[in-house]
Amino acid sequence: MFSIGRSGLDEAFAALDRLAGDLPRRALADALNHTANQARIALRAEMESVFDRPTPFTLNALRILNAKPDSLEAAIWVKDDKDNNAKGQAPEDWVAPQVFGGPRVDKKSEMLLRRRGILPAGQFVVPAEGARLDAYGNMGRAHMMQILSGLRLLNRPGYTGDASNNWRSFRKGHARAFFVMRRGKVPIGIAERRGRTLQMVLAFVGQPSYRQRLDFHGIVRRVVDERLAVNVDKAVADALAGRLPTNFRRRPQAWPR
């Protein structure tokens, strides 16, 4: 998270002294919110540039806490709640390693494989040669669900998505298709056999470690340095013309520059 406030920028806000009543606080809140939105746009553009085919879910995960006249601080962060998405992770979980570097957290599939004792401690999964990938280069959800179902990892109270012996499940063949591939006694991945075709679909690897690719804080700081004082001047002009917004909860449209 990066917070944007007035601290250290008093000289830039001398124009606010021209306003009376509650207008200085309203104008400053408006300027902070436009700056936060411009930072969001800059961050999204950078994510599209440095990430390999980022999903819309990732690009739309940037959130803004708007400033208000009685709370003169705006904040921008990456969504940190899971919303029951298929990955079992919040967007923050996979964006944070790109911001700070270092290891990533377990995916939901890895938690299930580890809980059943299939995935060894300290190992993680990556798509192997036989994996069916989506348009963004990630493991396709449908294929992953087939794997987890075939390995009988989707059973929980009140629900089961596991492959079974009933005729419909039997015809799909997932229970017979997927198995743990080993080198000697060491599990090295998950394989899929369909007819005479045998392919590894998931490989077990060591802890992935990421280098910093998204300079989240640097980008926001640059936008603040370049735009905040300009946005204050624009907000003062709007205040004098009676154009300041009254609703500070809605995201402002970024002013064209």
Image: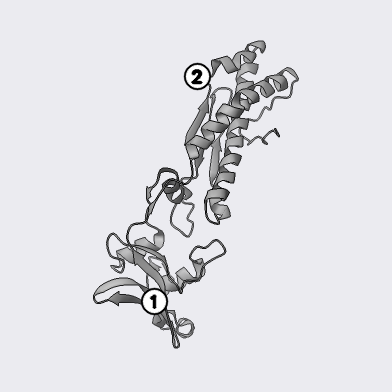
Q: Kindly identify which numbered label has been placed on residue 191.
A: 1
Q: Is residue 249 left or right of residue 199?
A: right
**Quarter of the image where the C terminus is located:** top right
Residue 238's x, y, as percent? Answer: 72, 22
- Badge 2 or badge 1: first in the primary sequence: 2
Callout 1: SS:
strand
Colour setting: one colour
Task: Choose top left, top right, bottom left or bottom right for residue 124.
Answer: bottom left
Q: Which mark is residue 8?
A: 2
In the displayed structure, does residue 86 sit left or right of residue 45?
left
In the rendering, at what x and y percent does residue 114 appear?
31, 64
Q: Nearer the viewer, residue 176 or 181?
A: 181
Rendering coords of residue 44 (x, y %): 58, 45
Tag 2: amino acid: Gly
Are the residues tagged 2 and 1 within 8 Å (C-beta)? no
Q: Is residue 214 above or below residue 52?
A: above
Element carrying mark 2 = loop
Mark 1, other Cα within 10 Å: few <14 / some 14–19 / many ≥20: many
Foreground of the two, 135 or 65: 135
| Distance Cα–Cα, label 2 vs label 1 | 58 Å
Residue 16 vs 179, above or below: the answer is: above
Name the residue: 59% across, 18% down.
12
| Location of residue 64 with respect to 143 vertically, above or below | above
Residue 29 placement (x, y as % from top left): 60, 25
Which residue is most to the left?
185
**Is residue 121 at all visible to an observer of this figure?**
yes
Residue 84 higher or lower than 79, as above or below: below
Q: Residue at x 69, y 33 (%)?
A: 255
Q: Which of the 4 image quadrants contains residue 108?
A: bottom left
